[in-house]
Image (cartoon, helix red, strand yellow):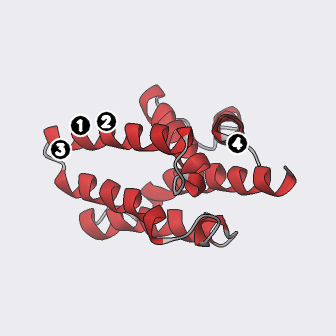
Amino acid sequence: MPGYKLHLAGGGIAVGGALAITHHYGLAVFDPFTASALMVVGLLAAIFPDVDTNSKGQHLFYALLLVVDIVLMVQERYKWAAILGFVAMLPAVSRHRGFTHRWWAALLIPASICALPWWFYQLPWQAMLPWLAAAVLGYTSHLVLDAIA
């Protein structure tokens, strides 16, 4: 079973490759901050299915979420902080290799999370597509690596 480092590498390759392809073909061009944020989303999604166990990946995942959550609260972005808190709780409601390791979850969980800003902020759903793609690619890389290892 791959460890968190291999899952991070797989997520980085999947999301980084997608960013490079979309940039190269002019499909989407992101500023450096947004591209970095999309990469972070993909990396977090790549280790998300395993954060229900006590591991280095779990500690890294929650440390990053803690920093982001504090920044959101300091900036008084409480709805975004609430969305992040919701995401952080998801693995706790399943056993290891439960629903978080199902193929349908790689689309359903990120899609559900991406729907929250649309609901709370009435953002156009199209604005969430890059974030959904990054999360799905990172998440799927985890499942692929688990399947072949």
Question: Between disc 1 and disc 4, whose residue precedes?
Answer: 4
Name the residue at 67% across, 70% down.
Answer: 102
Q: Which residue is mark 3?
A: 73
Is the residue under label 3 in contact with that under label 1 (CB below 8 Å)? yes
Name the residue at 28% across, 66% down.
Answer: 122
Query: For the residue marked with disc 3, what is the amino acid?
Result: Met
Question: Between disc 2 and disc 4, whose residue precedes?
Answer: 4
Query: For the residue marked with disc 2, what is the amino acid?
Result: Val
Categorize mark 4 by other alpha carbons within 10 Å: few (<14), some (14-19), many (20+): many
Counting from the top left corner in percent of width and height, residue 50 is at: 59, 53
Counting from the top left corner in percent of width and height, residue 120 is at: 26, 66
Q: Which residue is mark 4?
A: 14
Image quadrant in which you'd find residue 83? bottom left
Marks 1, 4: nearer the viewer? 1
Q: Secondary structure at mark 3?
A: helix
112 vs 58, nearest the viewer: 58
Marks 1, 2: nearer the viewer? 2
Is the residue under label 2 in contact with that under label 3 (CB below 8 Å)? no
Q: Secondary structure at mark 1?
A: helix
Residue 55 appears in the rendering: yes
Categorize mark 2 by other alpha carbons within 10 Å: few (<14), some (14-19), many (20+): few
Gap between marks 1 and 3 measured at Cα: 5 Å
Name the residue at 21% across, 58% down.
Answer: 79
Which mark is drawn over residue 67? 2
Gap between marks 1 and 4 measured at Cα: 27 Å
Gap between marks 4 and 3 measured at Cα: 31 Å
120 shown above or below 51: below
